[in-house]
Image (cartoon, rainbow, N blue to C red):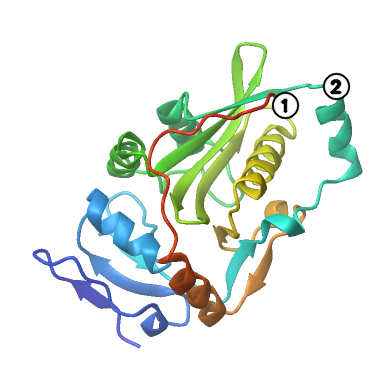
Amino acid sequence: MPVFRLPDDELVFPHPELADPNGMLAVGGDLSADRLLLAYEWGIFPWFNPGEPILWWSPDPRFVLFPDELKIAKSMRPYFNQRKFTVSFDERFESVVRACQQQQRNGQGGGTWITEDMVEAYYRLYESGYAHSVEVWQGKALVGGLYGVALGKIFFGESMFAAVSNASKFGFITLVQYLQKVGFRLVDCQQQTRHLGSLGARAIDRQLFLDYLTQNREETTHVGHWTLPTAH
């Protein structure tokens, strides 16, 4: 299948089902807030390396977590029982994104796909009240976290980091428990990882994912910064 080139003067994407077998759908366009929000509404996300044009993806299958399927390993229970970390929402968004940018990952030198343009683009979404961060603290040190975009009742995860063992898991579990309480139906994890699989995420057919997105367009998006109501 061809990869579509996006026009510069129109906010439009090809249908996600037209992605190539690897999930690549389109190239070009920009990272404006309006284009990013349209992309997420259709389950499309940007992912590209420095020096490359903007690449847009819609993989099949899609890796997701249904909040009521969250798995908390026994090894994590002492972290919560003993309150080894504390968690906040939307207090240090840029710090979380930049920590994700610098995170060492298997098979690459770091999170280099989070370009400076990406940092700026998601910070604009954060300022607009659509992007959110989870900060995990050990004392006054930021030791883990994640960020993503919320539309309706779906949270679209982008990246996470951990400076100490289990910090990102602690933050992710806290986020999913919060999302359960406020009625979210789905967490989009984009692509499969063992880390997220251990927490209950699983692959679903892209068409089923698109069906959830269609239903989600009827939901109201709570725009604004989040506050975690209870300490963990």
Q: Is residue 126 above or below residue 185?
A: above
In the picture, measured across the screen, residue 20 lies left or right of residue 77, that is: left
Q: In this view, does 77 lie above or below 210?
A: above
Image quadrant where residue 116 sits: top left
Label number found at residue 82: 2
Residue placed farthest to the right in the image? 74
x%, y% of residue 99? 50, 31
Residue placed farthest to the top in the image? 140
Q: Which quadrant holds the N terminus?
A: bottom left
Whether residues under marks 1 and 2 lie with C-beta atoms below 8 angstroms apart, the answer is no
Graded by Cα atoms within 10 Å as few (under 14), some (14 to 19) or many (20 or more), the crowding at tag 2 reads few
In the picture, measured across the screen, residue 40 lies left or right of residue 71, that is: left
Foreground disc of the pair 1, 2: 1
Spatial distance from mark 1 to mark 2, Cα to Cα?
A: 10 Å
Query: What amino acid does circle 2 point to?
Result: Gln
x%, y% of residue 195? 71, 51
Label number found at residue 232: 1
x%, y% of residue 11? 18, 65
Q: Which quadrant holds the C terminus?
A: top right
